[in-house]
Amino acid sequence: MINVAFVCLGNICRSPMAELIFTQMVKDRELTSSFRITSFGTSDCEEGNPIYPPAKKTLIMHGIPGNHTARHISLKEIINNDYLLVMDSSNLFDMLRLTGGKFGEKIIKLRSFTPNPHDVADPWYTRDFEKAYRDIYEGCECFLEYLLKEKSQMFDYDKRH
């Protein structure tokens, strides 16, 4: 099983969008038994809050179902995840600060897997939830393709059982 956590600041916009988009991609490929997918915030400022309504509306417009409650990332979650995919440079810095520089090999910007790496702009400030969706979707798609290539033997086993 591959444990993937998406991370942004408050865990109400970008990281829950990524969690739900990636969950749908994995489901569409019949690989749900191969993954545990979650999301977190580097701050506890939104802990307990639902996904931000414009983010949820954008997901619904793209046929992505799901609900979410914001959670603050803990050291336990950092240790227990194979990939901690952050949305931007600020999230990357926050994660490295939270971990004291440990676990850097599994803290990666989501869009690092794309042909055009850049930060996912925060729609909380830009108000452009559609652009955030496109950036996150491409990042998730490229990340999944990376995993399918790098972990192909594991997925072959899962498909047979």
Image: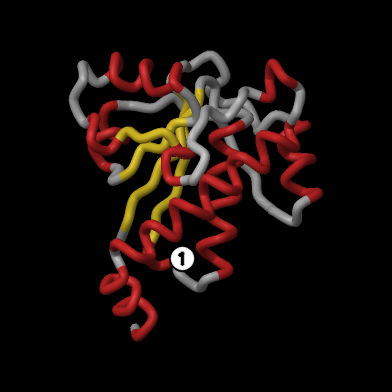
In this rendering, would 5 be left or right of 150? right
In this rendering, would 97 be left or right of 110? left
x, y percent for residue 136: 58, 41
x, y percent for residue 38: 45, 43
Residue shown at 29%/64% (left/top)? 151
Residue shown at 60%/50% (left/top)? 21
x, y percent for residue 94: 37, 16
Compared with 30, 134 (above or below) is above
In the picture of the structure, the residue carrying the numbered disc 1 is 32
Its colouring scheme is: secondary structure
Q: Amino acid at mark 1?
A: Thr
Density class for disc 1 (Cα within 10 Å; few <14, some 14-19, many ≥20) is some
SS under mark 1: helix
x, y percent for residue 32: 46, 65
Residue shown at 67%/43% (left/top)? 134
Q: Could you tell me which quadrant the C terminus lies in?
A: bottom left
How many marks can you see? 1
> Is 153 or 33 nearer to us in this picture?
153
